[in-house]
């Protein structure tokens, strides 16, 4: 099982993702620099958080046209698992791998805090665990997810909404919405079910010393999903 | 040579918290007749061409593919001949 963490100029959660995967979960992982291409032997690609290309023009837009993204898009279209976290989510939106767009937070502030997430769809490679409310931090200024009413209906009909901001008890309320996102959306998956984008940072909640280990569940879920395939191959 | 101005702003039905905040500040300053403020981006492109029609096609593509995000933003543009730059080039 091999993971790849894509590194753009301005990515700043790449090392955290790499550490969580290699040292906490214990899987093979490589950094993939933005000028390179993704080789066929990866099982899952991570697009980490940060400020790729300084967020110039719009978060994610310049990264979307970088050379590595051509192979990421190809990898995703052929069914490979892709997880975009924060800026990684913004890049997936700009690349058209996920629907919708990000607006500035309703408060116009950069928000960095723990939030609670209701897991709305457990039938994905990323959410194969029992827990239904996760505590994972967010850190962004452009995480106010927007999609038009037709698009929202499609997301709902296809069960593409995976995480929604909620209270510690799991109630999805306006007060629990940190940034103004449509329908409290914190994470969505594509129709094929192999590309997930989320604003919260699971890599920052992977060890008890960090205050939560709920993020680890997502990485472990990916491994559990991939394991049978690998066992079949060897 | 053409000087092209592209204006990108949020669509009418997309919340613009920055515009709202500026609108509130204007009301505080007494500009009570200001109904709405929309914040956007302004680009100036110098395009080396003599063919205005081709420039226009290119500007629409540039604006759709890169300068704006069609999910949340609209754009408008103005294309003007730029004789100053032409002289400079000669």
Image: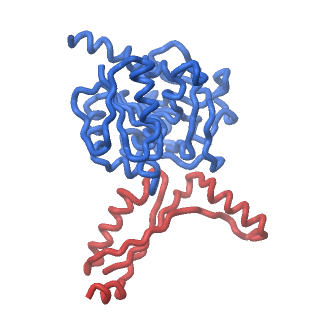
Residue A205 as seen in the image, left or right of residue A34: right
The N terminus of chain A: image quadrant: top left
- Identify which residue, A132 or A213, lies in the foreground: A213
Quarter of the view holding residue B44: bottom left
Query: What residue is shown at x 61% (from left), y 45% (from top)?
Result: A110
- The vertical placement of A51 against B32, above or below, is above
- The vertical placement of B71 against B56, above or below, is above
Camera sees residue A155: no
Quarter of the view holding residue A164: top right
Residue A94 spot, x, y in % from top left = 40, 47
Render colour scheme: by chain
Query: What residue is shown at x 31% (from left), y 43% (from top)?
Result: A34
Query: What residue is shown at x 39% (from left), y 74% (from top)?
Result: B4
Camera sees residue B5: yes
Which chain's colour is blue? A
- Identify which residue, B82 or B89, lies in the foreground: B89
Residue A154 as seen in the image, left or right of residue A210: left
Query: What residue is shown at x 50% (from left), y 46% (from top)?
Result: A102
Q: Could you tell me how many numbered marks the image carries? A: 0
The C terminus of chain A: image quadrant: top left
- The vertical placement of A157 against B63, above or below, is above
Residue A220 spot, x, y in % from top left = 43, 17
Residue B42 spot, x, y in % from top left = 48, 68
Which chain's colour is red? B
């Amino acid at each position: 099982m091999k993971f790849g963490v894509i590194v753009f100029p301005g990515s700043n959660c790449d090392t955290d993702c790499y550490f969580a995967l290699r040292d906490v979960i214990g899987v093979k992982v490589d950094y993939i620099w933005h000028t390179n291409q993704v080789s066929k032997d990866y099982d899952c690609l991570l697009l980490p958080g940060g400020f790729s290309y300084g967020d110039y023009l719009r978060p994610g837009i310049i990264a979307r046209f970088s050379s590595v993204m051509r192979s990421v898009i190809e990898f995703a279209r052929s069914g490979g698992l892709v997880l975009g976290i924060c800026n990684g989510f913004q890049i997936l939106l700009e690349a058209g791998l996920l629907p919708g767009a990000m607006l500035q937070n309703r408060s116009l502030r950069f928000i960095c805090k723990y939030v609670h997430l209701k897991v709305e769809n457990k039938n994905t490679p990323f959410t194969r665990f029992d827990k239904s409310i996760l505590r994972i931090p967010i850190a962004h200024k452009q995480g106010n997810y927007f999609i038009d009413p037709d698009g929202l209906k499609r997301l709902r009909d296809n069960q593409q909404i995976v995480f929604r901001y909620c209270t510690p008890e799991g109630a999805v309320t306006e007060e629990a919405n940190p940034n103004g996102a449509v329908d409290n959306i914190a994470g969505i998956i594509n129709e094929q079910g192999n590309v997930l984008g989320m604003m919260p940072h699971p890599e920052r909640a992977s060890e008890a010393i960090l205050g939560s280990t709920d993020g680890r569940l997502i990485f472990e879920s990916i491994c559990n999903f991939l394991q049978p395939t690998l066992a079949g191959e060897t | 040579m053409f000087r092209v101005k592209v204006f990108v702003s949020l669509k009418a039905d997309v919340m613009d918290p920055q515009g709202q905040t500026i609108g509130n500040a204007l009301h505080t300053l007494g500009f009570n007749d200001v109904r709405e403020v929309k914040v956007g981006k302004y680009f100036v492109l110098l395009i080396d061409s003599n063919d205005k029609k081709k420039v226009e096609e290119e500007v629409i593509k540039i604006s759709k593919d890169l300068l704006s995000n069609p999910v949340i933003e609209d754009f408008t543009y103005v294309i003007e001949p730029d004789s100053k730059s032409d002289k400079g080039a000669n």
